[in-house]
Image (tube, rainbow, N blue to C red):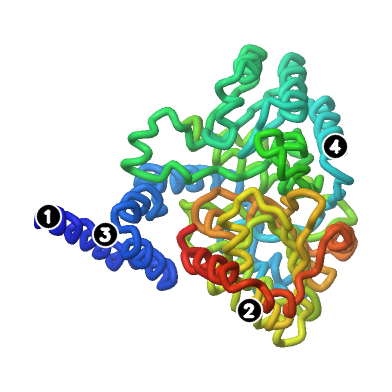
């Protein structure tokens, strides 16, 4: 018994000291880990060992720096310059665009055009048509790439393009696309001449567990065709029915088809990931900058565990703080940190109409519970919450004042904030923002409003459950 108590004391003490030594950990996250260690010390110690630290390792961070040091001298014009914020962006939003530019160096550039895709089927049809017209190259990267109808159609389009001499590079995340990577379809793509790569592979799981985290993922969704067209939004390469989790379907996504300089910036994100996954040198031949007229200012944003800590929540907060009249946000996973939560509530308190749209039925029960733990404070601050009931609302959109749009792969949870590689596009354009606002209004029309009076009547056991999960939200 004495030895057992001593072992218990040493384990808890060791992990407590480790948590206290971490300067990068927020006080709420530190407190959440202390609670877990106190309540379930052995399980908590194991969880902290597996999932407690966001670290891809020194080699990955060094390689990330090398990649961008290699890219930047040969692609400086694609990054843009700081004058773009002042010259192109409304003064109200310049600070947020400047902050976004600080994450990985892309500044807003004029001359972009975009089209909002009607739905998931229309997105796939347009994308395949673009691939079938490709003359030079096609680059694709997906977190989840299934072997269903959509996944197979995209793979077949890449194989057709490769056979007619188009350079095709396809990259998939080692966890999210593991079924495809092990499938005959992946082999067929390679045999057809498609260059394939796995980002963050799981071929050495023990080493990954010992030196990093197995749930550090590449969550990006990037498609670039001939350096002239790129798609950005929430859609993975999968049918909306999403058979692995069909009972939550359909998955409702949103995508924009872009042309203009933002295509080259998205291309650089893909190339940087490709270089890190394959070790290949930078090939500037795929880069092209084409400004269209008329066109709007936009820039790509790439975040991930090799960028500075807290970049994504600070970006969202900067955008919320710029809003003058409206903020409308859709996200499937809402577990904000204090920075984001305070910025949303502050915006509502100063008279901005804040509208939040979440799925009514979530594929993650723990995220659903944590999200509802924030409802009372948000509603008390004057925010409006709607729960989408026509499937799993997977769209990640933010519109501000009918002028500014952020669209891409980032959710408002810890995974997107600290763990995943993400890609987004931030733009200023009334027409495209209005189109996204209209889509958001369509989501609201298929939603139930959540009222403060109803939240106050939730049973005590339900409120306790939500608040317990929200308490450990900083480590989810």
Residue at 38% over, 54% down: 53
The part of the image, by quadrant, that contains residue 44 is bottom left
- Count neighbours of disc 4 (C-alpha within 10 A) and say few if under 14, some if 14 to 19, many if 20 or more: few
Q: Quadrant of residue 182?
A: top right
Q: Residue 377's mark?
A: 2
Q: Is residue 321 visible?
A: no
Is 400 displayed left or right of 476 in the figure? Answer: right
Q: Which residue is mark 4?
A: 121
Q: Residue 10, image x and y in percent?
A: 17, 58
* First in sequence: mark 1 vs mark 2: 1
Residues under labels 3 and 4: Cα distance?
Answer: 49 Å
Provide the residue designation for mark 3: 15
Q: Secondary structure at mark 2?
A: helix
Residue at image point 78% right, 46% down? 290
Q: Are marks 4 and 2 in contact (CB under 8 Å)?
A: no
Crowding at mark 1 (Cα within 10 Å: few <14, some 14-19, many 20+):
few
Query: Percent position (x, y) of residue 3?
Result: 10, 53
Q: Earlier in the sequence, mark 3 or mark 2?
A: 3
């Amino acid at each position: 018994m004495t030895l057992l108590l001593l072992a218990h004391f040493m384990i808890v003490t060791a992990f407590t000291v480790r948590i206290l030594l971490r300067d990068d950990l927020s006080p709420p996250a530190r407190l959440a880990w202390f609670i877990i260690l106190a309540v379930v010390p052995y399980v908590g110690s194991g969880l902290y060992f597996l999932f407690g630290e966001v670290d891809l390792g020194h080699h990955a961070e060094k390689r990330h720096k090398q990649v961008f040091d290699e890219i930047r001298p040969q692609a400086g014009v694609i990054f843009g310059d700081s004058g773009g914020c002042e010259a192109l962006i409304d003064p109200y939003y310049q600070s947020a665009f400047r902050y976004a530019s600080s994450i990985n160096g892309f500044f807003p550039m004029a001359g972009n055009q975009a089209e909002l895709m009607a739905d998931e089927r229309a997105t796939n049809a347009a994308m395949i048509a673009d691939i079938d017209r490709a003359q030079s190259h096609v680059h694709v990267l997906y977190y989840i790439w299934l072997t269903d109808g959509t996944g197979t159609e995209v793979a077949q389009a890449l194989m057709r393009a490769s056979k007619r001499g188009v350079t095709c590079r396809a990259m998939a995340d080692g966890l999210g696309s593991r079924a495809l990577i092990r499938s005959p379809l992946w082999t067929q793509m390679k045999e057809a001449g498609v260059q394939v790569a796995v980002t963050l592979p799981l071929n050495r799981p023990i080493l990954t567990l010992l030196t990093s985290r197995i749930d550090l993922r590449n969550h990006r969704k990037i498609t670039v065709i001939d350096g002239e067209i790129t798609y950005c939004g929430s859609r993975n390469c999968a049918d909306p029915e999403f058979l692995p989790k069909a009972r939550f379907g359909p998955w409702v996504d949103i995508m924009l088809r872009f042309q203009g300089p933002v295509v080259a910036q998205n291309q650089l994100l893909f190339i940087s990931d490709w270089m890190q996954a394959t070790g290949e040198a930078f090939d500037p031949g795929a880069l092209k900058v084409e400004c269209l007229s008329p066109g709007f200012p936009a820039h790509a944003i790439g975040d991930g565990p090799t960028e500075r800590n807290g970049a994504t929540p600070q970006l969202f907060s900067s955008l919320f703080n710029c809003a003058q009249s409206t903020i409308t946000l859709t996200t499937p996973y809402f577990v904000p940190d204090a920075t984001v939560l305070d910025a949303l509530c502050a915006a509502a308190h100063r008279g901005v109409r804040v509208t939040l749209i979440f799925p009514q039925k979530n594929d993650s029960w723990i995220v659903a519970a944590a999200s509802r733990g924030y409802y009372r404070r948000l509603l008390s601050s004057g925010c409006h919450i709607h729960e989408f009931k026509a499937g799993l609302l997977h769209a990640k959109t933010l519109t501000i004042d009918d002028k500014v749009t952020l669209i891409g792969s980032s959710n408002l949870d810890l995974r997107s904030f600290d763990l995943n590689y993400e890609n987004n596009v931030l733009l200023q354009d009334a027409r495209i923002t209005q189109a996204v606002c209209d889509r958001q209004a369509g989501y609201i029309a298929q939603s139930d409003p959540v009222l403060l009076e109803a939240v106050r009547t939730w049973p005590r056991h339900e409120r306790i459950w939500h608040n317990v999960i929200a308490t450990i939200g900083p480590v989810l």
